[in-house]
Amino acid sequence: MTTNPNVSGSLRNRLVLTLIGGAAVLAVLLFFAVRNYAAQVAQQGQDNILEASVTSILDAAALRDGVLEVDIPYAAFSMLTTPTDDRVFYAIYQDGVFLSGYEDLRLAAAPAQSDWSFTSGELRGERIRQVSASRTLVGLGRQTEIEVVLGQTQDALSRTLDQISRNAAFLGLGFFLLTAALSFWITSTTIGQLNKLTTSVTRRGPQDLSPFKKPVPREMAPLVMSLNSLMGRLDQSLSQSEDFIAEAAHRVRTPLATVRSYAEATLHRVERKENREALRAMVRAIDESSRAAGQLLDHAMITFRADHLVREDVDLVELIRDLVQRLTPIAEMKELSLSMTGDPTVPYSGDPILIQNAVRNMIDNALKYAPLDSTVEIEINGKPEIKVSDSGPGFLPEEVETLTRRFERGKNAAGTIGSGLGLTIAQDVAIAHGGTLVLTNQPSGGACVILSL
Amino acid sequence: MKFLLVEDNLDLANAVSSRMRLDGHVIDHAANLEDATAFVETEEYDLILLDIMLPDGDGRDFLKRHRASRLDTPVIVLTARSQVSDRIGSLDLGADDYVTKPFDHAELEARCRAVLRRKSGSAKSTIEIGGVVFDPVAGHLTVAGETLSLRNRELRMMELFINAPGHVFSKQKLADRLFSYDDSVTDNAIEVYVGRLRKHLEPSDLKITTLRGLGYRLDHDH
């Protein structure tokens, strides 16, 4: 009945993946931004100290009697002390000629405008940061240029950087975990609204086609609106087709009833045998067509109800007693009796209208084939089972399998009016309730139909 | 018995009425709910036959109003709808029974009889001729102080004879009255029922005479 929808992807997964993916990218960006900024700040700090150190060295340089004298102050190096004992290299040049220090510490090509030049490089296998600065000394008509290069390894800096990186990584990871959790929560609350709608639509009874009224988020309003309008149209077309069936039945059956009544009335006035035969044939034909129409409508109704089975608690005995009471006049017309035996009450949960209809068809069938002055027995037991047996000719063994098919009638049914739908209806009802319909013959002769629910 | 038939289809109403009159009943016919209401307010009926789809409304509304005004006249609904869906509505609203159109007149009659019997106590309509008391509603025949229950076909045959003493009924006519159209009827069957009635009537002044080639007649000996 229900077709599974064509599923392509999951809204939840898509939402979660997008949100988590976004969070991951953001976390990585955050990590790099923090690390770069920290690296810049740290580098700036080292540069400042180097600058101050170089400045103090340059300040200590003086021309004495035309000779350059540099007395490197203690503070110039002590300010460069780091917890990791970074090594410091220096070189002093005068007018481009190496004077003192490490000769492999080369002068950087100083930029034209600035006296300062910071570069990063490598010395003796270690990464260093070096600063070059120069100062022009003038004395006794002599002018000389002193240049100082100061380099420092970066162990402390890289240790600080490692620490900062680690913290930045923790920060990024924390940010990622938080947003991931947040996105799971957001997704499930969003999808939860959809689930809530689904549950309340699913929980509805099959007859409930009223519009959906509970408050929903604004974004879901269009969905609910189209759902409501669909249900509205369905309801309308269902009640229209129900009205249509009722109206059609009315239009067909009322004139049939008129024809039948006239034919019957005429039959009472007509004496000639041929005319009487013709009138009887007419009445039988009308009965046959109206019964077929009725059973077709019943069958359609029963198929519908069986598809949407609504169970209620009923007492089978009471249900069948009502039915037997209603069928008694028909039985009496044929000088037949109906007898009911079995348990005093049999509680069951099922569709009372379907069960009554099935049993009515079973009893109708028995009444049609039962011989004059006989009794049709209806037995109800707690299994629960409803047995209807008559003392008619019974079923032909080879037909037992086929009689419950649509429009299938027994070979010995030629003389009676019927549509061939009665036992089909009874079987459909049995199947809808998860039971069976069994056709057998009694040992003493006569048909026995057992409806097990 | 006095019946009210509420049915908008005139052909059907005429056919049902003439058939009912044939059985010796009095029938008033209303073609819509307005007339039906007027009839119910002025006359007293033993039984109402009510169509559901009427030009000025739904027969079930009439039924509801009828029951609300505490009138307990039995009602049989004539419906053209599917038996499955209509059963609920009309029986819950207080109808005593229903027949689905097109109905077998014998079935309608049987249902009327069953409903009247269930509601008996309202009006006794016994017929008394020649020391025989016949109660068609209860299906009782009292002959020489002894009451016996008639079986359905005996009852219907007795009804025919006692409503028209001295009238000759052909075997065919009796068969039409006693059997429905899907029963196979033999002349022998009629003789069986006539035989049974004769036996019941033996102690009384009534007897059923055979007119060879014509049929049967109920005679009253003095």
Image (cartoon, coloured by chain):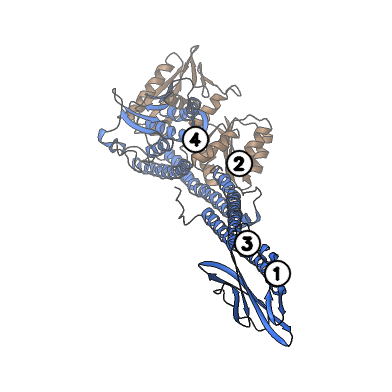
Which numbered tag is attached to residue A52?
1
Taking the view exactly as shown, the residue that stands out farthest to the right is A140
Q: Earlier in the sequence, mark 4 or mark 3?
A: 3
Residue A179 shows in this picture? yes
Residue type, label 3? Val
Residue type, label 4? Asp
Q: Which residue is mark 3?
A: A34
Q: Are marks 4 and 2 in contact (CB under 8 Å)?
A: no
Label 4: state its secondary structure: loop
Q: Which residue is mark 4?
A: A351
The residue at the point 65 percent across, 35 percent down is: B66
> In the rendered view, would you say A9 is above or below A260?
below
Q: Earlier in the sequence, mark 1 or mark 4?
A: 1
Q: Chain of mark 3?
A: A
**Chain assigned brown:** B
Classify mark 3: residues with Cα within 10 Å, few (<14), some (14-19) or many (20+): some
In the rendered view of the protein, which quadrant contains the N terminus of chain B?
top right
